[in-house]
């Protein structure tokens, strides 16, 4: 008789459903952004939501790694330690310039020096904990519960939902080793499904009303009848 096999590796364990990444709905994001207190914080959040960089990756950016003319910012990739240029939105670079002008005399200058600094003197390089607390305070003011990492998911969803962007390009920007990881963002977001279904129901109602509304007699203007009798004639 064969000895019992060691099944501790979970050969017969059922696969758990993959958790859908949480993104930040547009209305919620706008509420948070409106409560950010400084140009530095607005620049940070704008870069997070447009590049899809991880929180620690964006904080690794240095002053010489910013190229506004090409709309690129260089970061150090988590895990590999490689330097990668990431495209960012125009708004992100506008907020960045405002932040640099606002603290021009307080921030140490140097191409190899960090891009992000604390707002209090003496200035120190911004840490992940400080950036997390900044975003947490804005959430508390807005009455929301988003996280910095949720901004990465938000950027990923926005890119994946754009038909002009190939999924392999989204994979490259996000720094995913496997395309299957990027494919998670093809799963529709709940708020997007709700929006489309409500639009569907509204269209069904409109078509039903159009089918039951009698046509105007020849020689009568539909617009004139609406003015005289209303749409429920």
Image (cartoon, rainbow, N blue to C red):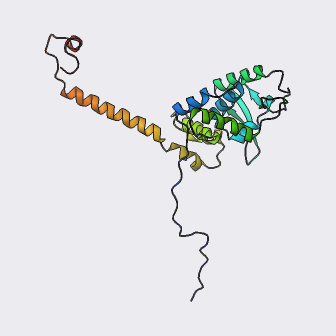
Relative to 5, residue 86 above or below: above
As rendered, which of 231 and 166 lies closer to the eye?
231
Relative to 115, residue 182 above or below: below
Question: Split into 4 quadrants, where in the image is the C terminus?
Answer: top left
**Number of marks in the image?**
0
Q: Is residue 119 visible?
A: yes
Residue drawn 62% across the image and 39% down it: 152
Q: Decide if residue 223 is on the left or right side of residue 201.
A: left
Residue 224: x percent and y percent? 22, 10
Q: Decide if residue 125 is on the left or right side of residue 14.
A: right
Residue 140: x percent and y percent? 61, 36
Residue drawn 73% across the image and 43% down it: 77
As rendered, which of 81 and 143 lies closer to the eye?
143
Question: Split into 4 quadrants, where in the image is the N terminus?
Answer: bottom right
Q: Residue furthest left?
A: 217
Q: Is residue 87 visible?
A: no
As rendered, which of 56 and 160 lies closer to the eye?
56
Residue 230: x percent and y percent? 22, 17
């Amino acid at each position: 008789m064969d000895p019992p096999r060691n099944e501790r590796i979970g050969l017969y364990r059922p696969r758990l459903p993959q958790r859908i990444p949480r993104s930040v709905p547009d209305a919620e994001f706008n509420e948070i952004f409106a409560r950010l207190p400084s140009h530095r914080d607005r620049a940070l959040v704008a870069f997070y939501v447009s590049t899809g960089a991880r929180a620690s990756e964006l904080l690794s950016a240095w002053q010489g790694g910013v190229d506004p003319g090409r709309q690129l910012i260089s970061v150090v990739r988590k895990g590999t330690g490689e330097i990668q240029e990431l495209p960012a939105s125009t708004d992100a670079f506008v907020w960045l310039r405002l932040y640099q002008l606002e603290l021009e005399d307080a921030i140490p200058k140097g191409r190899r020096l960090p891009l992000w600094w604390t707002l209090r003197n003496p200035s120190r390089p911004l840490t992940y904990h400080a950036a997390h607390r900044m975003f947490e305070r804005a959430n508390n003011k807005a009455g929301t519960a988003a996280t910095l990492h949720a901004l990465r998911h938000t950027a990923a969803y926005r890119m994946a939902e754009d038909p002009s962007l190939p999924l392999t390009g989204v994979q490259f920007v996000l720094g995913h080793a496997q395309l299957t990881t990027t494919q998670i963002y093809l799963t529709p977001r709940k708020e997007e499904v709700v929006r489309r279904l409500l639009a569907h129901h509204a269209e069904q109602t409109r078509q039903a009303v159009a089918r039951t509304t009698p046509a105007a007699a020849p020689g009568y203007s539909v617009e004139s009848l609406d003015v005289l009798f209303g749409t429920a004639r």
